[in-house]
């Protein structure tokens, strides 16, 4: 029997900067070194060394290619090609020989068809030096950063299309509500164009906040902000249907009138499900996972937005309506968006312990030597979260104080929540219960806020970073 002792890479193309490491494959076992990717096309090889009990007549090591990674033009993803004769796994998806899949930062790659018996890797994109060091300065007339409804600086900005005018979320939400009650079409408050789309604009929101920071006299009172927030109903992208008139030169039936030439964004636009059917004024939400549409229903008890990130997901809604996806309408699996209490976790998330894989290894060993599973620990700390036994200040989710075991979260937000809970598990675990190799480490002065741990392997391994900072801005 042979075993893989190390990983090596072969460059097959020239990158724009040959010294730049633009990505890494980070092994789950810290005994193995990272695979550094410098070229735009990179072949990853495994070195196989026969064990003493091997019946092979050759004692020399063998090297074989198992994947090729090509940098994509968006610089935020890559394409992985399976070069081995075996099936490999990428984010739980089976990739056959010569097939490919797009991978992103945090993607898990296993050079075999199953998890057991193979060393897994995390694909990690490195920050680009030319983008991380530049700061963009924008000059803008203050009058161009004002909502044309309330005539004040934007608050929680939304942009509408196709005219691309910008308004406060609360102002436009109230305009939208009143227009739906009185008119068949929603018109832009500024130019009177028919509105087809509305969505939050985080870029302009940052500009608005910078203006208010520079000139505090432009700020609203706390009472005004509270009223605006109470009106705000746009949490994610809305697709707004308009009544359309079609000219016909031939006779037609009522059914023809209803169906011909009319877009049906979602299944409930053409058929009634659960006692509801969309009409011409129904506003639609676009799912962030599958890109499909669902009606925006403020009076439903079924969650349509992830409370952790405010993005829309359709899995829970269509599951409650007992509607399945078709070629015409994309629908998410129920697994993509469900309550915390119904979820399970079998591996430590990529985000845990500020992405420090040495701390992740220690947490995994600690759980294992205590005879527990990761799911046991997560379930225990979700109960503590429900009982308000945890300080939520550092929880990396929106509306942290509102989150309970019954809250619907998307997959990304659930992994961030588990990472947050694992921090509390570690700092509450007595030192004598930690693995032997972790007992002698001293705490880093900067704790979880340490930036050196991300680029200095020796420091990340030598110091404990699952602790509160005693120096720096986070202290």
Image: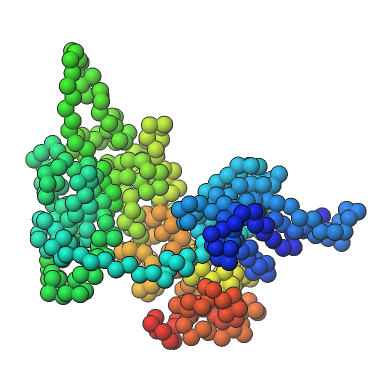
* Coordinates of residue 127 in the picture (x, y in percent): 48, 66
Kindly identify the residue that appears in the image at 18 percent across and 24 percent down: 246
Q: How is the image coloured?
A: rainbow
Which image quarter holds the C terminus?
bottom left
Residue 226 in view of the camera: no
Numbered circles on residues, count: 0
Q: Is residue 418 left or right of residue 89?
A: left
Q: Nearer the viewer, residue 399 or 174?
A: 174
Quarter-wise, where is residue 318 in the image? top left
Which residue lies at the image location 55% right of the left edge and 46% below the top edge?
A: 101
Q: Position of residue 216 (x, y in %)?
A: 16, 75
Q: Is the N terminus in the top left, top right, bottom left or bottom right quadrant? A: bottom right
Q: Quadrant of residue 266?
A: top left
* Residue farthest toward the top in the current orientation of the protein: 251
Q: Position of residue 282 (x, y in %)?
A: 21, 39
**Which one is in front, 37 or 355?**
37
Q: Specify whether residue 19 is in view.
A: yes
Q: Quadrant of residue 116?
A: bottom right
Nearest the eye: 31 or 454 = 454
Please provide percent x and percent y for residue 55.
Answer: 89, 53
What residue lies at 17% left-to-right and 33% top-to-bottom? Answer: 243
Q: Is residue 348 left or right of residue 159?
A: right
């Amino acid at each position: 029997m042979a075993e893989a002792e190390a990983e090596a890479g072969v460059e097959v193309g020239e990158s724009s900067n040959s010294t730049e490491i633009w990505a890494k494959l980070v092994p789950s076992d810290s005994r193995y070194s990272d695979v550094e990717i410098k070229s735009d096309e990179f072949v990853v090889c495994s070195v196989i060394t026969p064990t003493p009990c091997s019946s092979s007549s050759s004692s020399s090591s063998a090297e074989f290619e198992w994947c090729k990674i090509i940098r994509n033009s968006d610089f935020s993803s890559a394409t992985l090609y399976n070069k081995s004769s075996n099936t490999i796994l990428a984010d739980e998806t089976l990739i056959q020989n010569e097939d490919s899949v797009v991978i992103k930062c945090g993607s898990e790659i296993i050079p075999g068809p199953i998890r057991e018996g193979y060393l897994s890797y995390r694909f990690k994109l490195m920050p680009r030096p030319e983008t991380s060091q530049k700061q963009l300065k924008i000059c803008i007339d203050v009058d161009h950063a004002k909502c044309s409804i309330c005539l004040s600086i934007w608050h929680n900005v939304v942009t509408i299309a196709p005219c691309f005018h910008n308004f406060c979320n609360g102002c436009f939400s109230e305009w939208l509500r009143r227009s739906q009650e009185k008119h068949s079409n929603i018109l832009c408050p500024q130019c009177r164009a028919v509105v087809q789309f509305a969505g939050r604009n985080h870029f302009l929101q940052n500009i608005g906040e910078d203006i208010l920071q520079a000139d505090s006299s432009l700020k609203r009172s706390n009472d005004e902000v509270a009223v605006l927030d109470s009106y705000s109903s746009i949490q994610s992208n809305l697709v707004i249907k308009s009544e359309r008139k079609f000219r016909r030169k031939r006779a037609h039936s009522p059914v023809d009138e209803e169906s011909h030439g009319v877009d049906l964004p979602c299944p409930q636009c053409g058929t009634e499900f659960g006692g509801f059917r969309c009409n011409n004024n129904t506003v639609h939400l676009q799912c962030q996972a599958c890109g499909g549409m669902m009606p925006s229903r403020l009076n439903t008890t079924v969650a349509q937005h992830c409370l952790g990130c405010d993005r829309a997901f359709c899995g829970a809604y269509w599951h409650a309506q007992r509607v399945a996806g078709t070629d015409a309408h994309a629908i998410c699996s129920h697994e993509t968006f469900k309550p915390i209490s119904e979820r399970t976790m079998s591996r430590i998330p990529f985000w845990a312990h500020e992405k420090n894989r040495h701390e992740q290894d220690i947490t995994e060993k600690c759980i294992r030597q205590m005879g527990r599973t990761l799911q046991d620990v997560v379930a225990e700390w979700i109960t503590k979260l429900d009982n308000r036994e945890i300080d939520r200040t550092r929880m990396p989710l929106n509306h942290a104080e509102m989150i309970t075991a019954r809250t619907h979260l998307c997959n990304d937000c659930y992994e961030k929540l588990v990472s947050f809970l694992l921090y509390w598990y570690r700092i509450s675990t007595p030192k004598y219960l930690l693995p032997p190799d972790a007992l002698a480490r001293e705490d880093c002065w900067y704790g979880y806020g340490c930036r050196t741990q991300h680029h200095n392997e020796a420091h990340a391994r030598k110091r404990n970073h699952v602790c509160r900072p005693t120096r720096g801005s986070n202290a």
